[in-house]
Amino acid sequence: MTVGVVDIGTNSIRLLITGGVREVRLEAVTGLGTGVDSTGVLSESRIVETLVVMNRYGRLMDEAGVEVRKAIATSASRDAANRESFFDRVEEMIDVRPTLISGEEEARLAYQGAVQGFDGPGPVVVSDIGGGSTEFVTETTGVSIDIGSVRITERAVPYRPASREEIVEARALIRELFSELPAIEFTTLIGVAGSWTSLASVARALPLGTSVHHREVSRVEVGRIIDVMGLLTVEETADLPGLDPKRAPVILGGILVAEGVMDALGADHALVSEHDTLDGVAMALLALP
């Protein structure tokens, strides 16, 4: 059976087609949740940009002969008063209505996807940094906190270059939000989603599109990248090797959150995975009788 999964995130819209002859993974950065933290609604301009992507994804699923399709919507949609009208328009493009999932469900799906095919040492804790929320999840517990690359950018580092005071404020805010995490016992930290994959790619100046699956990043590397990136304009950031230029406005915020995750957990290293929530949903669909 061929299944198609669409993940409608705060910053990016992703597609996974799997189970058939050829697997397809696509991502488009539309910044759907830009401004939602302050306005409580999805902006029309970002909706229109997202619908263009949805139209393309719908056609690709048709062409691939997808038999079962599912779309999930996360943090930005959870916060948006106009989500149902947005969902109406998405359904017209991809022939399935998005399912709004909770932060806890998002965490569970991210864990299931991230540990797929992982044979390293456990126990494992998975960190899923989105645009609007960050999940911490183990085999038995999941916590979702309302901070991500877009949200921290809008709250603490809206201008680039970022001042030293803004970086300090962002770190303090992240530290405060993560301070009430329960104690988590783990051996391996796995980071999933765009902030983590971009971090791994930029750390090694990889050609855009190079796989970073199961590449490792250190806490020292993260700090060094923040020191450099904080001094750059958005345009200069967009030119960094290994970075999707559309992520440039919020990637500093995303990497600050990654730093905060590592500090909150006391982790010196993180393993980056390209398997995440999409894979968790696809696994459930493929298991259907």
Image: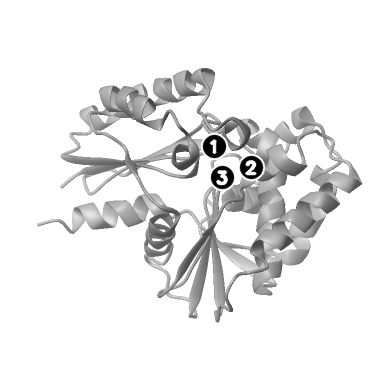
Q: Which residue is mark 1?
A: 11
In-front residue for pair 103/6: 103
Q: Pointer 1: residues within 10 angstroms few (<14), some, or many (20+)?
A: many
Q: Which residue is mark 2?
A: 151
In-front residue for pair 176/248: 176
**In this view, which residue lies farthest toward the left?**
289
SS at circle 3 = loop
**Amino acid at the residue labelled 3:** Gly
Cβ–Cβ under 8 Å for marks 3 and 2: yes
Query: Exactly how many numbered labels are in the figure?
Result: 3
Q: Which residue is mark 3?
A: 132
Cβ–Cβ under 8 Å for marks 1 and 3: no
Q: Quadrant of the C terminus?
A: bottom left
The residue at the point 20 percent across, 54 percent down is: 286
Query: Which is nearer the N-term, disc 3 or disc 2?
Result: 3
Query: Which is nearer the N-term, disc 1 or disc 2?
Result: 1
SS at circle 2 = helix
Query: Which is nearer the N-term, disc 1 or disc 3?
Result: 1
Q: Pointer 3: residues within 10 angstroms few (<14), some, or many (20+)?
A: many
The residue at the point 77 percent across, 55 percent down is: 171
**Amino acid at the residue labelled 2:** Arg
**Amino acid at the residue labelled 1:** Asn
In-front residue for pair 222/102: 102
Up-down relation of residue 270 to residue 162 (above or below):
below
Cβ–Cβ under 8 Å for marks 1 and 2: no
Q: Picture coordinates of residue 9 (x, y %)?
A: 47, 40
In the rendered structure, find residue 37 and report the number of the disc placed on it: none
